[in-house]
Image (spheres, helix red, strand yellow):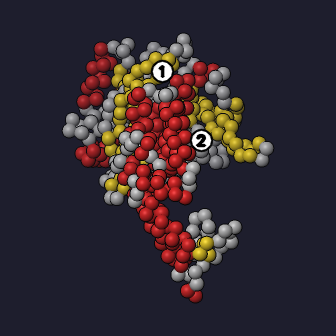
């Protein structure tokens, strides 16, 4: 007789991934993009599991013994059984390190190898380099609202594309599995209803929760499969999304297989942050410290921006050179916006390859100047530039009053601790966009936990 498996919002994602249930893996769909799945290499947990406070001494002793023997959380969970309410006797514990067990890995030897390569001297895994398999952030971070029951997933959120007034838009719907007799081609069918968390019984009761998974490769670990990190932390996934979008702005949209010189660019970390938690009964927000998953870079942002500016100029120069040496030795016309084609194209204002080469040489000179020197050079051709930049700096200062001092420091670190008076216009625009994103997060995150 097969043992009944309980699915809940704290263990379901990892268990689904470990069991390899194709239907349920497909059901862990994204909230803001299409479903996307790569072959799995293993699961890394954002923390640990521990016995509930009302567990008996016997349960706690069994937990400690099995933990010392190297048992997985699922093995311990099954051995302890369920409490009087039919729920697991284990709860997730927020700690300052990641956990990975041999049975979390397709190749069980990889668990020890990851610890050998990246763990701190005390054996705890707090930071590791990662490489993302794709460029789209919504495929890197699969996330949704979902509700699990005894037999698996009961409800899941999904965005559907719709057209309104000839404009593409998206609406969130709630999907639930249909009960159909016989063999169904293409997997289980899903019915739909409206998804409104404010009026949803499952969401208001805490049965339906937000959750997601982060997918990545780990340098030095062999295999084609991606590693998956499940989490229910809105703060963590939102901060990771913001980091991915910012880096994509620097690298012209590239996130996959990203290196700075010879080292992986991204670092996955556990960091302690103060967050706001709303009591659903009183509606009041309280502040508390919590260990969150954080995505950082292995290089300072000034060096990264400079590096990719130089890369872009080199790429454009190569295109311009190829264009200049066109067929029959003629200087072909090029795309007036991007200089992308070595063949003649039609545009409103055509430029010769010689013009493009001259522009790129001038751009290379500008990149090597300091922000102050760049501003002085820019003012020669654009007399309104100083006033426009000053206006943007004043707007940033006015918007920044909505952040705490700690949040201001975090924002400043994203720009290599440079003061806004040292930023050029393009960096000021990115600074304001990041600032506004943080303000929106701060205003909404309390109600969305």
Which residue occupies the foreground of this view, 81 or 286? 286
Residue 75 lies in quadrant = top left
Mark 1 or mark 2, which is nearer to you? 1
**383 or 271, which is in the foreground?**
383
Looking at the picture, tell me which residue is in the foreground, 375 or 346: 375
- Element type where label 2 sits in the image: loop
- Residue 387, horizontal then vertical, whole percent: 54, 45
Instruction: Give x and y (percent) for residue 208.
Output: 56, 26
Relative side of 4 to 145, left or right: left
Q: On screen, 249 above or below 64?
A: below
* Residue on which the image places disc 2: 32
Q: Is residue 30 left or right of residue 179?
A: left
Residue 205 vs residue 262: left or right?
A: right
Callout 1 crowding tier (Cα within 10 Å): few <14, some 14–19, many ≥20: some
Residue at screen point 40% across, 29% down? 406
Labels 1 and 2: the sequence-earlier one:
2
Q: CA separation, marks 1 and 2?
A: 24 Å
Say above or below: 177 vs 248. Answer: above
Rendering coords of residue 195 (x, y %): 66, 30
Specify whether residue 419 is in view. Answer: yes
Residue 141 visible in the current orientation: no
- In the current view of this chain or complex, which residue is farthest to the right? 165
* Residue 439 percent location from the top left of the image: 52, 31
Residue visible at 37% across and 53% down in the picture? 303
Bin the neighbour count of mark 2 within 10 Å (Cα to Cα): few under 14, some 14-19, many 20 and up.
Answer: many
Residue 277's disc is 1
């Amino acid at each position: 007789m097969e043992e009944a498996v309980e699915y809940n919002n704290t263990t379901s994602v990892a268990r689904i991934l470990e069991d390899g249930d194709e239907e349920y893996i497909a059901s862990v769909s994204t909230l803001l993009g299409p479903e996307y799945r790569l072959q799995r290499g293993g699961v890394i947990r954002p923390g640990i599991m521990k016995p509930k406070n009302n567990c008996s001494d016997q349960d706690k002793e069994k937990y400690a013994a099995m933990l010392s023997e190297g048992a997985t959380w699922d093995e311990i969970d099954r051995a302890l059984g369920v409490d009087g309410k039919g729920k697991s006797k284990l709860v997730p514990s927020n700690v300052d390190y990641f956990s990975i067990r041999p049975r979390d890995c397709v190749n069980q030897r990889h668990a020890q190898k990851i610890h050998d390569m990246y763990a701190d001297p005390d054996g705890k895994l707090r930071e590791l380099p990662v490489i993302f398999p794709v460029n789209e952030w919504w495929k890197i971070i699969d996330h949704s609202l979902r509700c699990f029951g005894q037999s698996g997933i009961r409800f899941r959120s999904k965005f559907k594309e719709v057209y309104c007034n000839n404009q593409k838009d998206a609406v969130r719907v709630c999907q639930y599995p249909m009960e159909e007799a016989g063999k169904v081609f293409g997997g289980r069918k899903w019915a739909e209803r409206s998804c409104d968390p404010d009026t949803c019984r499952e969401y208001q009761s805490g049965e339906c929760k937000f959750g997601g998974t982060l997918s990545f490769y780990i340098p030095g670990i062999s295999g084609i499969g991606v590693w998956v990190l499940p989490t229910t932390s809105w703060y963590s996934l939102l901060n990771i999304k913001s980091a991915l979008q910012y880096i994509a702005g620097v690298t012209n949209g590239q996130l996959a297989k990203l290196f700075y010189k010879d080292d992986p660019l991204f670092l996955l970390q556990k960091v302690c942050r103060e967050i706001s938690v709303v009591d659903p009964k009183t509606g009041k927000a309280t502040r508390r410290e919590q260990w969150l998953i954080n995505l950082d870079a292995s290089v300072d942002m000034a060096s990264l921006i400079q590096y990719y500016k130089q890369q872009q100029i080199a790429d454009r120069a190569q295109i311009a050179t190829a264009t200049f040496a066109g067929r029959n030795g003629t200087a072909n016309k090029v795309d007036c916006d991007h200089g992308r084609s070595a063949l003649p194209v039609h545009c409103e204002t055509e430029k010769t390859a010689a013009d493009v080469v001259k522009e790129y040489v001038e751009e290379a000179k500008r990149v090597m100047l300091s922000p102050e020197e760049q501003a002085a050079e820019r003012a020669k051709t654009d007399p309104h530039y100083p006033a426009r930049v000053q206006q943007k700096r004043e707007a940033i200062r006015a918007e920044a009053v909505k952040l705490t001092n700690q949040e201001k420091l975090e924002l400043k670190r994203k720009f290599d601790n440079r003061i806004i008076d040292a930023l050029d216009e393009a960096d000021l625009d990115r600074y304001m966009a990041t600032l506004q994103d943080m303000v929106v997060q701060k205003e909404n995150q309390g109600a969305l936990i």
